[in-house]
Structure formats: C-alpha cells, structure tokens
Amino acid sequence: MPSVLGFAADLRCVWDFGQTGRGTPAAFAPPKKLVVVGFYRFVRNPMYLELFAGWIGLWIVFGRASAAAIGVAVGIVAIVILFVLFYEEPTLRKKFGSDYEEYCRRVPRFMPRIRAWRM
C-alpha cells in the first residue's frame, strides 16, 4: 500500500508542476511559478518523500530489503539531501526570491506539517 500511495502522490506533484508551475520537475524544463499547492502545502520536498515511500512499499511487498539495498538507499538519501541543500534550494531562492523565503519559513523541508500552509 505505501508503494501505491507514494507513486500516486508523485503523479499528483507532477500534475501540480504542470498546472500551477507551468513546467516540470526536470531541471531542463523547470516551473515558471513557485508551486505551493497540493502536497507542497505540507512539505517542501514531497516528491522525494513519496518516491522513498513507494520504494519502501515495494521492498515490503517483495521482501527484498537486503542489507545492501538498505545501504544503497541510505546513500541515495544522503545524496538527495545534499542536492536539495546545495543546488535546489539556492536555485529556487534566486528564481523566486522573497516568495520562496516565506515558503521556507512556513513549510518544513522534509518533515510534513500537520495542517496545510496557506499562502
């Protein structure tokens, strides 16, 4: 079940990037507007969390969570955190300025809020 929910939520985020942001999650076609709708009202990086939930769900279903797979996952999580801190957030600060700063003050990076933030 976590895999279905995680991957379905990722699709919703891609939809929000297209509809609200007029772009994609890909660096070569980024959104033109700051996306603060849907799951982005609860956490700044929902796509990463949803993707990890999806993979964890698949590991549970198929029973393939070996020590090596968990080690690789931990490494990937570390890379994602470094990517967010040193590339993604500085890029968004430059592009969206004070709107992104306000968003960062109100919405946590990886730990979802209980109530949705309203801009």
Image (cartoon, rainbow, N blue to C red):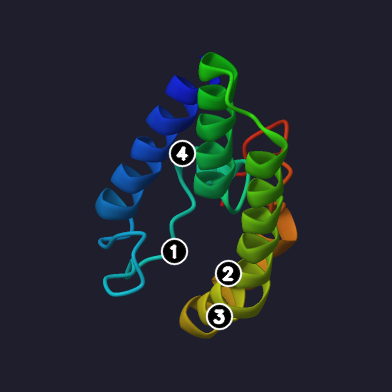
Q: Name the kind of residue labelled 2 in the image.
A: Tyr
Q: Position of 35 compared to 65: left or right? A: left
Residue 87 percent location from the top left of the image? 57, 78
Say which residue appears at 26% left-offset and 49% top-offset: 19
Mark closer to the chain start, 3 or 4 = 4
According to the picture, the residue beneath numbered tag 3 turns out to be: 97
The answer to whether the residue labelled 1 contacts the one labelled 2, judged by CB atoms less than 8 Å apart, is: yes
Cα distance in 3D space between marks 1 and 2? 7 Å
Residue 109 percent location from the top left of the image? 69, 55
Between 96 and 31, the one lying in front of the other is 31
According to the picture, the residue beneath numbered tag 2 turns out to be: 100
Q: Name the kind of residue labelled 1 in the image.
A: Leu
Relative vertical location of residue 44 with respect to residue 31 in this rendering, above or below: above
User: Of helix, strand and loop, which one carries label 3?
Assistant: helix
According to the picture, the residue beneath numbered tag 1 turns out to be: 34
User: Of helix, strand and loop, which one carries label 4?
Assistant: helix
The answer to whether the residue labelled 2 contacts the one labelled 3, judged by CB atoms less than 8 Å apart, is: yes
According to the picture, the residue beneath numbered tag 4 turns out to be: 38
Residue 37 percent location from the top left of the image? 46, 45
The answer to whether the residue labelled 3 contacts the one labelled 4, judged by CB atoms less than 8 Å apart, is: no
Mark 4 nearby-residue class (10 Å; few <14, some 14–19, many ≥20): some
Cα distance in 3D space between marks 1 and 4? 12 Å
